[in-house]
Amino acid sequence: MTKTMKNIDSFGHLRGESLFVDDIITKQNTLYGLVFDSICAHGKITKIDFSQAEKIEGLVKIFSHQDILGVNQIGGIIPDELLWAENEVHFAGQPIAFIVAESEFIAKKARALIKVEFKKLPIITTAKEAKEKNSFINAPRSFKLGDTNKSFENCDHVFEGEAFSNGQEHLYLETQGCYAYPMENGNIKIISSTQGPTQIQKAAAKVLGISMHKIEVDVIRLGGGFGGKEDQATAWAIMAAVAVQHLKKPVKYILNRHDDLRMTGKRHPYESTFKIGLTKDLKIKAFEAEFLQNSGAAADLSPAIAERTLFHATNCYFIPNVKTTVYSCKTNLPPNTAFRGFGGPQGMFVIESAIAMVADKLGINKRLIQEANLLSENDEFSYGQVATEVEAKNSWQSAKDNFNFKSLENEVADFNRKNDRFKKGISVMPIAFGISFTNTPMNHARALVHIYQDGSVGLSTGAVEMGQSVNTKMLQVACDTLGIDAEKVKLETTNTTRVANTSPSAASSTADLNGKAVLKACNSLKGRLKKVASKMLKTDVKKIIFNSNYIFINNKKTKLTWQEVVAQAMLERVALSENSHYATPEIHFDKTKEKGHPFAYHVYGTSITTVTVDCLKGTYEIDSVKMVHDFGKSMNMGIDMGQVEGGLIQGIGWMTMEEISYDKQGKLLSNALSTYKIPDIYSVPKNIETIPLETEGNKMTINKSKAVGEPPLMYGIGTYFAIQNAIKSFNNKYKLIFHSPFTPEKVLMSLYENVE
Ligand code: MTE
Ligand code: HPA
Ligand code: MOS
C-alpha cells in the first residue's frame, strides 16, 4: 500500500526545515563546550597549565578528569577508554579537558592558551608493529572448519599472499554534536547526534555517578552516521553532561570538521596474510587467513568488528577447510570504530584478493573460480551456521542472464585491442552478508504506539533516523497494519524515556527489529479496535478490515471511519496505547566453541564493474556497475535503491580514492577535504543499474523486506579488481598487489612497474 512512499524527511531536508542538533533553538544562558585534545600520540603528561586560558573573560570552567563524580570510563565492550586523559595520552586527538565558555569563539581562544608538556613514549601506528610488540586489545579469535593442513596437502594449487585495506573516514555531513541541559532534581537531558541513545544514557550515568533514570537522551535525526556515531557520539555527550551537572546550565558542543576528523576513529585498516588451496577443477578446498586489525588506542567496538571479519572471511563461497584468525592490534591512533559493513568488507577483500591471485597465477578468468565455489543450500559456514535460502547462485545466474558477462568481457577485450592509451578492466563481485548483531543479546527492539482520541497516531521506536529512511519504513509498517493514511502518523524522536534499553541503530537490523515491534504493537491495537468496530457494525469481528481510514466488512467498504471507531473505543475505555517488544528468535552463538547460528539470514547479490584506466595519467573512470541485489520483497524500492547506490559508492570510495594517512608520529595527515578525497558527482559510475532479485524474503525480516543498509557497500570491492585487470592488459609485467585504496598514484606506478 505504501510501497512507493517517499522518504518522509525529503521535503523538510530540501527546504532546510529538518532539525538537527545544531538547529535546536538554544535556551537562555546556554554555554558552549570545546575539547582540548592531545597533540602527542603517546606520552606522559608532565605538566598542564590552564591558568592563562582561565583568565579570558567569558570562560566559565575547564573540566578535566578531576571533575568527574562517577568513574572516568566510557569503554563499551572493554573498560579501557577514559573520558578525559589522566596521566598519559595514547593517541593524538585524545581528549584531555573540556573548555566551557560563553561562546564558541571564547572557548577557542582559551584552547590556544592551554599549555601542556609531555614526556614522549614510543608510538605505534601500524597493526604489524603492534603485533611484533605484542600490543593487543584482547586475545585473538580463530574460526575453524575441517582441517586446512591436511587439505592443503591434497590441493593441486596452493598460493600465499598478503592484502592491505586502509581505513575510511565516515564523513557524515553533520559532524558529531550534542546539546545537554539541566532538568529539575538533578536530572539531565541530552540531545545527541548518536546511533545509540541508550549507550550514552548508560555511560553518562556511570561517569556522572548517578543512575540511568536521571538521564534522558533524545535523538531527532542524524545527518549521517555510517557507524561513526554508534559508539563515538558518546564522549561529547557525556562531557557536556558533566558540565551541566556542575554548572546547572545548558551546554552545547558541536564539533567542527577539523576537530571531528582529528579526534574520531575510522574504519579499521587491516593487514592480512592468506593461503589458499584449490583442486584442478578450481574448487577451493582450503583457506587460511590472519587478519591484523589496526584497532587504535582503545577497544571501542573493535572486538565485535574483528569477529565480523571472521564471519565474512569466506564471503559467499563454500570452503570446507577454513582457519581464520584475527588480532585486534593496539596502536596509538584514535580508536577505530564501526563503519558500514563492520569488518565484513575487510574480510571479503582478502578472500577476493586470494582468488584474484589464483586467477592470475593460473592465467584464467577470476570469475570462473568465483562461480565454481558459490555457496549452495545447506553448506556450512566456518562458524557452524548452515546456509539456507541461499541466493548466491541465483543472484550470480541472474546477473549473468541480465548483463551477459561474456559479451561485456568481449567488449572490454575488443576495446583493449584497439586502444593503447586507455584500457578497460572488468570484474564480478558476488556478496553474502549476515544480518543480525553478531552479539546475540543485542537483537531486540521495542515500539510504543499511542492512538490519540482524534484518530491520529504517535509512533516511538528505538530506531534512529540517519538518512537510511528507517522512519519512513516504520511509518509504512504502522499505516499498512492499521489501514490509515501517513498523515495520521507522527514519528516521534528516539527517546530513552519512551523506548528504553535500545540497541544502537546498526548492523542493518534497525528496520527488521524495530519494524517487527511496530507490527506487533499495531496488531494488538487493531485487535482491540476491531472488536469495537464489530459491535458498531453488528458483524463478526473476523470480517472486519481496516483500510484507507475506513472499516470494511470483508471487501466491502462501510461508512464507518477509523476516527469514529477510535472515538467509540475511547468511550468504552479501551486502551489506545501499546508497547511491544521483539527479539529475533533462533539465533545463538557460543564463543567458547566459535560455533553457532548468529545470523537471522543472509543478504546476497552479484555485481559487475567495468572501468577505464588512462594509462598515461593513471586516472580512471568507472564506466558501469550492474548489480542483481536480493531485496527479498522490498517494502520500499525507492529507498532501498538509494541504499544500494549509496552503499556501492561508499564502497568504491573506500577501494579507490579515500586515503587515510597518519605520519609516524600518529598525526592525521588527511585532516581536511583537501587531503582526503571522497567520491563526488564526477567519480560515480557513469552507469549504475540495479535489478532486484525478487526472492521470497525471509520470515525474520520485516514484511519479507530484507535488510539493505550495509551489504551493497561490498559491491564496491569489485572496482579494485576491475582496475587491476585494466592494468594487467596494459602492463604484462605488473605483479599483482592487494593494497587498497587503488589511488591514481598507485595505478600509475603499477602501469609502469617493471617496464623498461
Ligand atoms: N544510509 C544513510 N543515508 N546514512 C547512514 O548513516 N548508515 C549505514 C546504512 N545506510 C547510513 C545509511 C549503516 S552503517 C547501517 S548499519 C545502516 O544504514 C543502519 O540502518 P538500518 O539498520 O536501518 O539499515
Ligand atoms: N554490527 C554492527 N554493530 C554492532 C554489531 C554488529 O554486528 N555488534 C555490535 N555492534
Ligand atoms: Mo552500521 S557500521 O552497523 O552502524
Image: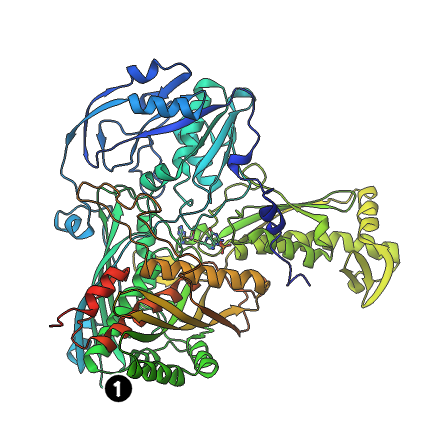
Q: Quadrant of residue 622?
A: bottom left
Above/below status of 175 relative to 294? above
Give percent across and percent down for residue 241: 45, 27
Mark 1: few/some/many CA within 10 Å (<14, 14-19, 20+): few
> Element type at marker 1?
loop
Give percent across and percent down for residue 152: 17, 76
Give percent across and percent down for residue 322: 25, 69
Amino acid, disc 1: Asp
Q: Residue at x 22, y 77 (%)?
A: 358
Above/below status of 293 relative to 552? above
Q: Residue at x 34, y 71 (%)?
A: 612
User: Dot 1 corresponds to which residue?
Assistant: 281
In the picture, which quadrant includes the N terminus?
bottom right
Q: Residue at x 29, y 34 (%)?
A: 94
Give percent across and percent down for residue 563: 81, 49
Observer-nearest residue: 157 or 398? Answer: 398
Can residue 586 be seen?
A: no
**Lateral position of residue 622 relative to residue 566, left or right:** left
Above/below status of 75 relative to 409? above
In the picture, which quadrant includes the C terminus?
bottom left
Above/below status of 57 relative to 568? above
**Lateral position of residue 649 relative to residue 553, left or right:** left
**Lateral position of residue 657 relative to residue 565, left or right:** left
**Lateral position of residue 638 relative to residue 317, left or right:** right
Observer-nearest residue: 146 or 128? Answer: 128
Can residue 339 be seen?
A: yes
